[in-house]
């Protein structure tokens, strides 16, 4: 059984197994979604991200019902900024974030937006880098759970989602980007990131819409 995707159906061998699949919900945090968080302070309209919340929740529900592992990521630094390099501090100053708690752990904005469907059984991975594999336990968790296939949702398509997907591909996970369950403040960047997944016959994985994904997941028995 497979998901209709491009440039080829997912997975490539037609053997979709819920128990070996994780849904990654990347950085759906208040700081990226609220009208006074990091994203808004960078001049982007968070409405572009907020509009995917219902779609992300629909995918989460469908994946959870059949036993897929649900993993949420959160990006932010220690409250004391001890894990922030001089360059990262400089960028923070350039972005006008000095004397704010934006993207700092323990702050309200660091938390996952309350509208996102998070279960106590879900896994939460905290990160400082754009990629969720960098300096985190994500790879260890996936391998401990026997996960070989990843479905990607969240924000932003062109930065944290794309970076994590590339990292996953280099670790030999089989990847699918759910294009309408991802978002960016820059529509051109969003579309470019989606396109880059598919070049060279799917060099970073495959792309599908949420309807195709949910349709496939619905064929499996609820656990």
Image (cartoon, helix red, strand yellow):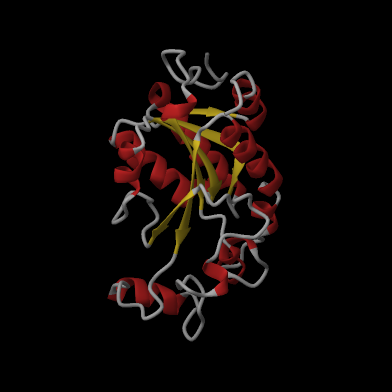
Residue in the picture at 48% in, 17% down = 8
Which of the pair 179/60 is nearer the observer?
Answer: 60
Where is residue 206 shown, x and y percent of the image?
Answer: 47, 27
Taking depth in this image into account, of 220 and 56 the one nearest to the observer is 220
Q: Does residue 14 sit above or below 104 in this rendering?
A: above
| Residue 41 in picture, x, y percent from top left | 59, 72
Judge by depth and name the residue closer to the eye, 123 or 189. 123
Q: Where residue 56 appears, x then y in whole percent?
A: 63, 43
The reply to whether residue 180 is in sight is no
Q: Quadrant of the C terminus?
A: top right
- Residue under the point 29% across and 36% down: 170
Residue 6's x, y, as percent? 52, 22
Question: Residue at left 39%, top 32%?
Answer: 204
Q: Eyeballing the image, is 103 above or below 124? A: below
Total marks in image: 0
Tell whether 71 sits left or right of 115. left
Residue at the farthest bottom position: 99
| Res 186 visible | yes
131 and 194: which is toward the camera: 131
72 versus 153 height, above or below:
below
Q: Residue at x 57, y 36 (%)?
A: 64
Q: Residue furthest front?
A: 223
Residue 169 falls in which quadrant of the image?
top left
Tell me the quarter of the picture where residue 178 sits. top right
């Amino acid at each position: 059984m497979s998901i209709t995707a491009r440039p080829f159906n997912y997975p490539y061998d037609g053997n979709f197994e819920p128990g070996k699949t994780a849904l990654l919900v990347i950085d759906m945090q208040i700081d990226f979604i609220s009208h006074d968080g990091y994203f808004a302070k960078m001049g982007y309209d968070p409405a572009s991200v907020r509009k995917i919340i219902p779609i992300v929740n629909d995918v989460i529900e469908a994946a959870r019902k059949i036993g897929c592992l649900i993993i949420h990521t959160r990006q932010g630094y220690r409250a004391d900024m001890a894990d922030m390099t001089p360059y990262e501090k400089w960028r923070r100053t350039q972005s006008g974030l000095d004397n704010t708690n934006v993207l700092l752990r323990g702050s309200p904005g660091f938390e996952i937006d309350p509208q996102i469907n998070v279960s106590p059984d879900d896994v939460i991975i905290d990160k400082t880098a754009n990629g969720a594999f960098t300096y985190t336990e994500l790879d260890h968790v996936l391998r401990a759970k026997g996960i070989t296939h990843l479905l990607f949702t969240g924000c932003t398509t062109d930065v944290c989602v794309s970076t994590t997907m590339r990292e996953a591909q280099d670790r030999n996970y089989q990847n699918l980007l759910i294009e309408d369950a991802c978002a960016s403040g820059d529509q051109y960047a969003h579309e470019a990131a989606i396109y880059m997944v598919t070049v060279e016959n799917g060099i970073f994985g495959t792309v599908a819409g949420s309807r195709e994904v949910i349709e496939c997941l619905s064929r499996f028995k609820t656990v």
